[in-house]
Image (cartoon, rainbow, N blue to C red):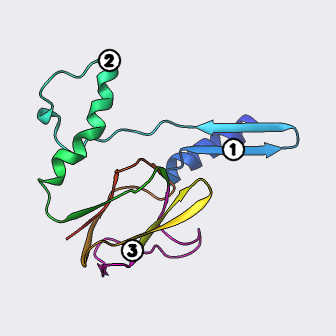
């Protein structure tokens, strides 16, 4: 496997938001993994103490603080898994920003341990925000959507 092919795969991962990729060619197995960026939903000024060393992980919990600042209802991930916005790679997404949804409508799929879990809307409303990208690994209780 040549370096150009590996570079193109890494670029593809970055463009599509994939965090892990495994490719086999004959006896060669290539595993690519990239770290996810932690994006704080609240301004940095909201952190009361300086962030150093292992405490950086505390920034991940800041979306809870912003939940009360933004209007609407957050749809949280019920499990750890991979977020899929559509039922198949070539299909349209279940929802897009601005779409009207009713309670029970499917918003996305979370793949966990080879099981596809449909995530329903918990309230009627309009999709105001999609908080994660297609193919992104999500954590338990991570915000997926904001419905107003």
* Mark-to-mark CA distance, 1 and 2: 31 Å
* Mark-to-mark CA distance, 3 and 1: 29 Å
* Mark-to-mark CA distance, 3 and 2: 39 Å
Residue 34 at x, y = what percent? 53, 37
Q: Residue at x 63, y 38 (%)?
A: 32
Q: Residue at x 82, y 37 (%)?
A: 28
First along the sequence among labels 3 and 1: 1
First along the sequence among labels 3 and 2: 2
Residue 95, numbered circle: 3
Residue density around tag 1, few if under 14, some if 14–19, many if 20 or more, within 10 Å: few
Q: Which quadrant of the rendered structure holds the C terminus?
A: bottom left
Task: Using the rendered view, name the quadrant where residue 29 is placed.
Answer: top right
Residue 1 showing in the rendered view:
no
- The answer to if 93 sits in the magenta stretch is yes
Magenta region: which residues?
82-105
First along the sequence among labels 1 and 2: 1
Residue 53, numbered circle: 2
In this picture, residue 2 sits left or right of residue 137: right
């Amino acid at each position: 496997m040549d370096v150009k092919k590996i570079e193109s795969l890494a670029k593809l991962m970055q463009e599509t938001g994939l965090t892990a990729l495994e490719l086999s060619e004959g006896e060669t197995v290539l595993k690519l993994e990239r770290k996810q960026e932690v994006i704080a939903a609240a301004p940095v000024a909201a952190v009361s103490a300086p962030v150093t060393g292992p405490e950086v992980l505390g920034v991940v919990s800041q979306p809870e603080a912003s939940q009360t600042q933004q209007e609407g209802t957050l749809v949280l991930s019920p499990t750890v898994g991979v977020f899929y916005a559509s039922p198949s790679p070539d299909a349209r997404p279940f929802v897009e920003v601005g779409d009207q949804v009713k309670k029970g409508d499917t918003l996305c799929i979370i793949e966990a341990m080879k099981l596809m879990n449909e995530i329903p809307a918990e309230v009627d409303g309009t999709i105001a925000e999609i908080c994660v990208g297609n193919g992104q690994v999500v954590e338990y209780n991570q915000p997926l959507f904001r419905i107003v």
